[in-house]
Image (cartoon, rainbow, N blue to C red):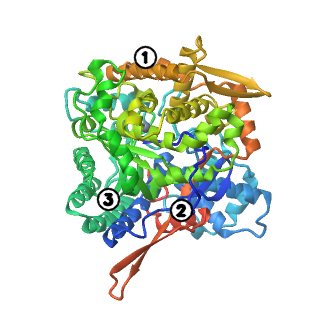
Amino acid sequence: MTHDNRNTDLPDPRPHDSVAGRTVDTFDDIRVLRYDVPGFDTLPLPQKKLIYYLAEAALCGRDILYDQNCRYNLAVRRTLEAIYRAGTDNPQEEEWLSFEKYLKKVWFANGVHHHYSGDKFVPEFSEAWFNARLAALPDEALPLDRGSRTEVSAVVQRVIFDPAFCAVRECRSVGEDLLTASAMNYYEGVTQAEAEAFYARMTDAGDPEPVSVGLNSRLVKQADGRLEERVWKIGGLYSPALERIVGWLERAAAAASPAQREVIETLIDFYRTGDLKTYDRFSIRWVQDTESPVDFVNGFTETYGDPLGYKASWEALVDFRDDEATRRTEAISSQAQWFEDHSPIQEQYKKKSVCGVSAKVINAAMLGGDNYPATPIGINLPNADWIRKEYGSKSVTIQNITHAYAENAKGNGFLEEFILRAEDRDRIARYGTLADNLHTDLHECLGHGSGQLAPGVRGDELKQYGSVLEEARADLFGLYYAADPKMIELGLVPDGEAARAEYTSYISNGLFTQLARIAPGKQIEQAHMRNRQLIGRWTYELGAADRVIERITEGGKTYFVVNDFDALRTLFGRMLREVQRIKSEGDFAAGRDLVERYGIRINPALHAEVLERYARLGIRPYAGFVNPTYTPVTDASGEIIDVRCTTDESYTGQMLAYSDRYSFLPTDNNR
Ligand code: ZN
């Protein structure tokens, strides 16, 4: 599971001392920022080498994600890049600028659909202009490896200019066939009912160690009507990219400690065989390796992109531990059983013995696949419920990314605009970052790992509502405990003010300011956003009689204010109890009703207001990052004697360089 940023618009009070949070590029609703890699230069050489090898492995899978997001993404990106590289005599021409903006959006989203909402981008250049540019290119410049010039041009034009074609990446609307209405490429010619029946047959409800069925394959309907899984493995689908990844992982394995070498070699074995039992073996070894200072995620990991929640997008992260900050999360994770025992959930759904919750604060060294350029600020893995229960989970908070967000928010005027009361603004300015980090720690280290299922419940009963409710459960856990006296006792916060800062900004964001991320006329699609509105609206309604949360209009502006922090905490506890019950019992109907009632629909007047106020402040609601560059320094014999980390690439420069260096897949992977 990942945790994305809630309150990215809050400033960090610490002094600004590096490139962290500098804006590299802006376009549409996006800011592209830099992150720095503090401490890299002083790492011992073996760790630097390991990071370098893992970083290359993290970049080699880039095209896999493009293809997973939509079959035509690689054809579109490569065609757009060909036009872009051919250049223009008139770089200020309006259509050229619109074209450049569109290309930057495609890079950011790893495809033609918005990275967050999943809606297809609308071009602001004309089809005639585009066709003239396309016609001017020679065949050699175009991606014609799997189709003729006529075929490729036709499909690229249709994807860009026909609004009804591949309209949404993943459909989540009740009543529609979630697969045939989606443009994602996890299924081909398969209906929702067929896919559900296919995986129901593969699922053994009595298996105490069930593999994650369907995780690493595309499900395809054959000409004769049979369904077949095309597995993503060496020798299978995506083989050319996976071979490169494995090549770098082999070097990483040779440079790693014996324990970590075993982890990496098991992953290599999984990429070679595609065997999901091997994947579970890898996950167990990975979660048990809590000592290695350098760590990584590399693989088919999160299932947010599949409306049915089987198929995992490819993602990567390379990181190393921040020892000082890790003391914060260790203080929490060492008390995991205490938190479980004192949780407001029903006794039978508490874990009797919480095992192996390891938590650390890390600095990201490289982002790849579904973590790039937009990235989570926390990650908790593995996702398989039985492994989490038997072996625990590893939870990370990505410190240099949260720091970059906070630096970038300095002086943006957000607090003055959206937080009504001066005492709330002061509190957020003083405690906001601390409280936000602490909430992320609680969410990741303990929230996702807490609770247990009733006997016979598998964990996938909540279907398309599962992700939202799981994020709600972890967030509620964090919100409930953020205000617990235990936080002060553990020395994590100086007093109760930090939780108040968190409550104020969480509620204002969930009910109101996060809507700045949604295009006019749309509803909420993304799981984390649905979860925040679900929590905001539900508490607002539950506490309405006592005005726990109050909507205030002043000077024509709307504000959401928390009046009673203690009562709000009690409400969070009640909600946590109910969401845990829904998960533990697999109560689909109750889960669906909650999400549909509170999580999805937007109040149009509030929406218009927040968009207008954001626009006036000039804040772009989404952010992502350019990666640093690692350059090995070799001696005369070719041996690596140092690795240099630089942070000076432009956004466009990095994207074009990645397309040059890491384009390993055919343009169309469905034929
Ligand atoms: Zn989460």
Q: Mark 3 points at which residue?
A: 293
Mark 3 Cα shell of 10 Å, populated few (<14), some (14-19), many (≥20): few
Confirm or deny contact between disc 2 and disc 3 (CB under 8 A): no
The N terminus: image quadrant: top left
Asked if 202 appears above or below 393 in the picture, the reply is: above
Under circle 3, the secondary element is loop
- Between 197 and 148, the one nearer to me in the picture: 197
- Between 331 and 79, the one nearer to me in the picture: 331
Residue 462 placement, left or right of 12? left
Q: Mark 2 points at which residue?
A: 144
Give the mark, 1 or 3, whose residue is nearer the N terminus. 3
Give the mark, 2 or 1, whose residue is nearer the N terminus. 2
Q: What residue type is labelled 2?
A: Leu
Confirm or deny contact between disc 1 and disc 3 (CB under 8 A): no
**Ligand 1 closer than 8 Å to label 2 CB:** no
The residue lying at 33 percent from left, 35 percent from top is 449
Residue 324 placement, left or right of 404? left
The residue lying at 36 percent from left, 85 percent from top is 635
Q: Tell me the quarter of the picture where residue 450 sits.
A: top left
Q: Tell me the quarter of the picture where residue 205 sits.
A: top left
Under circle 1, the secondary element is helix
Q: Where is residue 201 in the image (x, y as percent from the top left)?
A: 27, 29
Q: How far apart are the alpha carbons under marks 2 and 3?
A: 44 Å
Asked if 41 appears above or below 448 in the picture, the reply is: below
Q: What residue type is labelled 3?
A: Pro
Q: What residue type is labelled 1?
A: Ala
Ligand 1: give its quadrant: top left
Mark 2 Cα shell of 10 Å, populated few (<14), some (14-19), many (≥20): many
Q: Position of residue 178 (x, y in %)?
A: 48, 30
The residue lying at 20 percent from left, 62 percent from top is 258
Q: Name the residue under label 1.
A: 589
Give the mark, 2 or 3, whose residue is nearer the N terminus. 2
